[in-house]
Amino acid sequence: MRGLAHTDKLDPEKLEQFSLKVMTDIGSSVLTLLSYIGDQTGVYRALRDGGRMGADALARAAGVDARYLREWLSAQAAAGYVNYHAEDETFSLSPEQAVVLAQEGHPACMQGYAQFAISQLATYEKAIDVFRSGAGRPWGEHHSGCFCGTDRFFRPGYALHMLDSWLPGLDGVVEKLQRGARVADVGCGHGSSTVMLAEAFPASVIEGFDFHLPSIEAARERAEEAGVTGNTSFEVRAAKQLPAKGYDLVCMFDALHDMGDPVGAARHIRECLAPDGTFMVVEPLAGDSLSDNLNLLGQLFYSSSTLVCTPASRAQEVGLALGAQAGEKRLTEVLKLAGFTRVRRVAQTQSNMVLEARP
Ligand SMILES: C[S@@+](CC[C@H](N)C(=O)[O-])C[C@H]1O[C@@H](n2cnc3c(N)ncnc32)[C@H](O)[C@@H]1O
């Protein structure tokens, strides 16, 4: 029994604690699927809007099968995601549960991250192949939930911080945007940040670029819905193909570490800036060493990075594979190698850091 060679050294208490932790984590992944079912079928929203009710009434309100819903509600109640009232066999959401599970756009709502996680489970075979072979995995080859989930997860943080803290932290940029500036949002994904900028600064022209066509199509729809087609445009282009228009501001939201050649992309962006232009780089918050990142945020980002960011970078030329926890020191190095002379951190939130790079 070679595999059991260490069992004589086992500390039973530590074994119980650790196996409980792993069981909780595995249980959470199944629970996340249930939670995502509640998101996609509208059950959480129906419970939030309808208030305390029984399983049959909730099934009617949400238009789902009553038997499955009873089982689902039992699991949700056991997990503490919904409250069960035994006296009349009804269920309810507290205001906090309603925000985290059903309040789209609220920074505490976790459904975007759930959608992202489920999209990864849906394509686990590909993840195993890539992990074994070391091959790249292009961004565009993920399940569509990866793109929607990423947008849903990041958007509330941008809405909360970009206008009030990130842009004001940049030297003289808000004044330029108010007067009318030329802006590029590179790696814009579904265009949430592009649309926010266009709404806030109607005198400025905001151009969104991404090399992923379905994301650009989604961004165009988003701009249409928001009524900002007058000062936005979207184009399928890789970062290294940004047109040299003398931009006052180029921003990049959670995308630099996904690029195969972040140094080359940043160098090209520098060449596309006006002489006193600014490159704003928003990246996941991280310390400079693994030991600094051994916390929940590190766990979330290193996990996403193993599955998506690092293989996405590997699938492109150079394939630098910065990873989603590169940290300020490494990112500054990348920007300096690209020829930026002044790089400083201008803001940070619970999950992002914002760097200003000047030519
Ligand atoms: C994590 S997503 C972030 C999207 C968006 N900025 C957001 O914050 O929601 C990274 C984005 O970078 C794009 N991307 C990756 N490498 C790229 C490259 N070399 N050129 C242009 N876009 C790229 C991907 O298509 C994807 O939309």
Image (cartoon, rainbow, N blue to C red):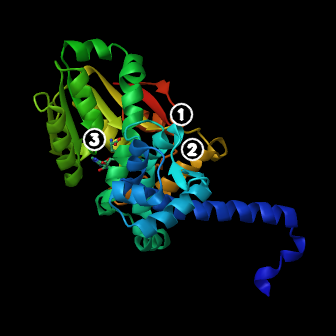
Establish whether ligand 1 lies closer than 8 Å to the Cβ of label 1.
no
The location of residue 254, given as percent across then percent down, is 39, 41
Is residue 309 at all visible to an observer of this figure? no
Which quarter of the rendered picture does the C terminus lie within?
A: top left
Which secondary structure lies at badge 1? loop
Q: Position of residue 337 (x, y in %)?
A: 41, 37
Quarter residue 355 falls in: top left
Q: Distance between the Cα atoms at labels 1 and 3?
A: 21 Å
Q: What element does badge 2 sit on?
A: helix
Q: Position of residue 335 (x, y in %)?
A: 41, 34
Nearer to us in this view, 141 or 98: 98
Residue 250 vertical placement versus 64 (above, below)? above
Q: Which residue is mark 2?
A: 297
Asked whether mark 3 and ligand 1 are closer than 8 Å, the reply comes as yes
Q: Amino acid at mark 2?
A: Leu
Residue 247 relative to residue 309: left or right: left
Relative side of 210 to 96, left or right: left
Which residue is under mark 3? 188
Q: Badge 2 local density, few (<14 within 10 Å), some, or many (20+)?
A: some
Residue at x 65%, y 41% (from the top left corner)? 292
Residue farthest to the front? 88
Q: Do the numbered discs 1 and 2 sit on residues whose CB atoms are within 8 Å? A: yes
Tag 1: amino acid: Gln
Name the residue type under label 3: Cys
Proximity of marks 1 and 3: CB atoms separated by less than 8 Å? no
Residue 350: which numbered mark, if any? 1
Q: Reply above or below: 152 against 350.
A: below
Question: Could you tell me which residue is drawn at 42 percent across and 50 percent down?
Answer: 44
Task: Tell me if residue 235 can be seen.
Answer: yes
- Going from N to C along the chain, the mark reached first, 1 or 3, is 3
